Image (cartoon, rainbow, N blue to C red):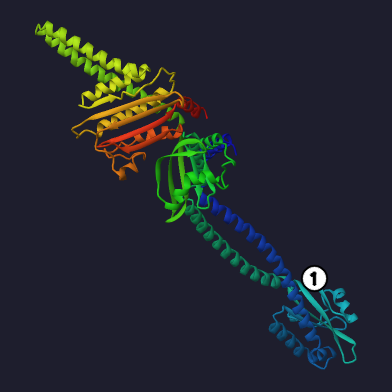
């Protein structure tokens, strides 16, 4: 389903008012139960009715055959047994076998016994039906008789020679048959009601169980939240990737997909598919091994620099996977470089402005004291010092922006009783710097600031800056040597780590940025202990670093 369809579905769910999940489940289950019970009841009723009629036929046929074979019945037909005895026998058999009537007929089809004694001696109500039995074969019949509609069986009565001498008719009225059917149906009805009650209780339990699993949310709410979740994930500016404990992708948003396309991966990153091995190694391998959250770590994904935060996921204490959020840092790094260079300019201008104001105050004070000769001498000395200092720097550094920056740093350091000395061997020819100037000033600014801070409590506060350019190799050479406290071995091992600092919180980014710049542009950096005290930073950077930075942004 596309994003547009998801949004439309979400709006429909939000605007529609439907039954709650519990009511829906109860309604569906009850309807299904009722329908199934009704169908079952109809089928069972038909079966019971058919079975009841079959049992009835078998019952009356058995009774009729037994009565026809009885000697008293045969004697009653031949006259050897009195009619009263035959009548009493017929009534007793009816009572014992729960049939409605046992009627004995002679060969002329005259009633010799009957539940209604007033019709004894009269012809059978349906002579044609009874006459069929005189052929010697029994048969069933559903006809209307004296006692009402009923089902009956005619059985021939034979003498010892096998001759038919009479007929026995045994039957049940339909009222009796229906009564027995209704008794059976009432049991079915009770079973159906019990089934319905169980179905309703089960539906309520199921609804509550499902709703508990769904955290009490209705289906429409779930659909709405899922739609909102997908929209939010796709609109955030950070890439999001989540994998389960088996390294299968659970979630990947649009921003992450776009960044992965820039990386030219060998395989697509798709939900329910294994994560590409290189991405797993860079993003998740450490988390899977340690189960410890990583925050704001710089990573390189197939040539793309990102800042990532990665966290493990647990369900009921069991490791379930990990989720990573990351952002392309190329554009941000470019901005940082420019801002850092701008800050260096600002610091230099501020220092020069402050020094200039101090000198102007001295001149103004001498004028107010009418010490004009001293004013002249002071201005001449300033001019000499300026020409000597500026002349030396500009003679060595032919790039105006870098020369101005170094002068600003020298003046700024003087206010803090620190001497920054440009080494005699320094030389920077006129070059078309482009973006490289921002990177160069960022490195110089961070190194000089760190050198000044390292000498706060030292008696000798001298920083030597060597800035050179190798024409043959087209390489910048930067060396900053201070007379500070030096760097212990245990700190030297961690000094380039992002956020690490011995100067307090919210520090520890300068050296990390320098290392990243050097690493990204295939440069060289070395930190050694200076003799007799202090630290020496030595850096080599290619002249083409500015172009490479621009290219990294376009990639």
Count of labels shown? Answer: 1
523 vs 97: above or below: above
Query: Which residue is at 26% across, 25% downward?
Result: 420
| Pick the front one: 301 or 83 | 301
The location of residue 62, given as percent across then percent down, is: 77, 82
144 vs 167: above or below: above
| Pick the front one: 299 or 62 | 299
Tell me the element at label 1: strand
Query: Which residue is at 44% across, 18% downward?
Result: 432
For residue 547, side relative to residue 511 (left or right): right
Q: Which residue is mark 1?
A: 143
For residue 81, side relative to residue 534 (left or right): right
| Pick the front one: 486 or 533 | 533
The location of residue 101, given as percent across then percent down, is: 74, 79
Q: Is residue 381 visible?
A: yes
For residue 14, side relative to residue 61 (left or right): left
* Quadrant the N terminus occupies: top right
């Amino acid at each position: 389903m596309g994003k547009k369809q998801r949004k439309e579905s979400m709006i429909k769910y939000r605007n529609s008012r439907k039954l709650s999940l519990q009511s829906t489940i109860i309604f569906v289950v009850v309807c299904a139960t009722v329908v199934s019970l009704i169908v079952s009841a109809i089928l069972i009723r038909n079966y019971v009715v058919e079975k009841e009629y079959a049992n009835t036929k078998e019952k009356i046929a058995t009774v009729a055959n037994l009565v026809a074979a009885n000697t008293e019945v045969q004697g009653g037909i031949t006259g050897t047994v009195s009619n009263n005895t035959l009548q009493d026998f017929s009534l007793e058999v009816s009572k014992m076998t729960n049939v409605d009537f046992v009627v004995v007929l002679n060969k002329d089809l005259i009633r010799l016994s009957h539940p209604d004694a007033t019709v004894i001696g009269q012809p059978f109500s349906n002579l044609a039906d009874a006459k069929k039995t005189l052929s010697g074969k029994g048969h069933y019949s559903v006809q209307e008789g004296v006692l009402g509609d009923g089902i009956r069986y005619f059985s021939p009565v034979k003498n010892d020679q096998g001759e038919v001498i009479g007929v026995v008719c045994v039957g049940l009225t339909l009222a009796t048959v229906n009564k027995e059917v209704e008794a059976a149906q009432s049991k079915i009805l009770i079973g159906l009601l019990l089934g319905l009650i169980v179905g309703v209780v089960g539906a309520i339990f199921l609804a509550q169980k499902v709703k508990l699993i769904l955290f009490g949310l209705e289906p429409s709410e779930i659909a709405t939240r899922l739609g909102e979740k997908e929209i939010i994930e796709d609109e955030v500016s950070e890439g999001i990737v989540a994998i389960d404990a088996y390294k299968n992708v659970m979630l990947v948003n649009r921003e992450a997909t776009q960044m992965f396309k820039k990386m030219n991966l060998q395989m697509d990153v798709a939900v329910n598919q294994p994560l590409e091995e290189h991405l797993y190694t860079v993003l998740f391998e450490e988390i899977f091994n340690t189960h410890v959250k990583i925050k704001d770590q710089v990573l390189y994904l197939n040539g793309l620099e990102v800042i990532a935060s990665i966290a493990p996921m647990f369900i009921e204490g069991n490791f379930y996977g990990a989720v990573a959020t990351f952002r392309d840092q190329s554009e941000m790094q470019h901005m940082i470089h420019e801002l850092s260079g701008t800050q260096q300019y600002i610091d230099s201008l501020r220092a020069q402005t402050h020094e200039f104001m101090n000198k102007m105050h001295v001149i103004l004070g001498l004028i107010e004291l009418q010490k004009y000769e001293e004013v002249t001498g002071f201005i001449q000395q300033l001019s000499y010092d300026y020409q000597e200092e500026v002349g030396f720097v500009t003679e060595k550094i032919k790039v105006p922006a870098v020369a101005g920056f170094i002068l600003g740093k020298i003046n700024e350091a003087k206010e803090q009783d620190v001497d920054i000395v440009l080494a005699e061997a320094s030389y920077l020819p006129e070059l078309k710097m482009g973006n490289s100037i921002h990177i160069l000033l960022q490195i110089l600014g961070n190194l000089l600031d760190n050198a000044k801070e390292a000498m706060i409590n030292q008696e000798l506060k001298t920083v030597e800056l060597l800035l050179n350019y190798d024409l043959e190799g087209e390489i910048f050479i930067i060396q900053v040597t201070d007379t500070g406290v030096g760097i212990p071995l245990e700190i030297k091992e961690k000094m380039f780590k992002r956020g690490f600092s011995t100067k307090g919180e919210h520090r520890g980014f300068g050296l990390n940025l320098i290392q990243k710049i050097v690493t990204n542009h295939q440069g060289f950096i070395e930190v050694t202990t200076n003799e007799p005290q202090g630290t020496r930073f030595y850096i080599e950077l290619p002249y083409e670093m500015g172009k490479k930075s621009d290219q990294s942004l376009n990639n």
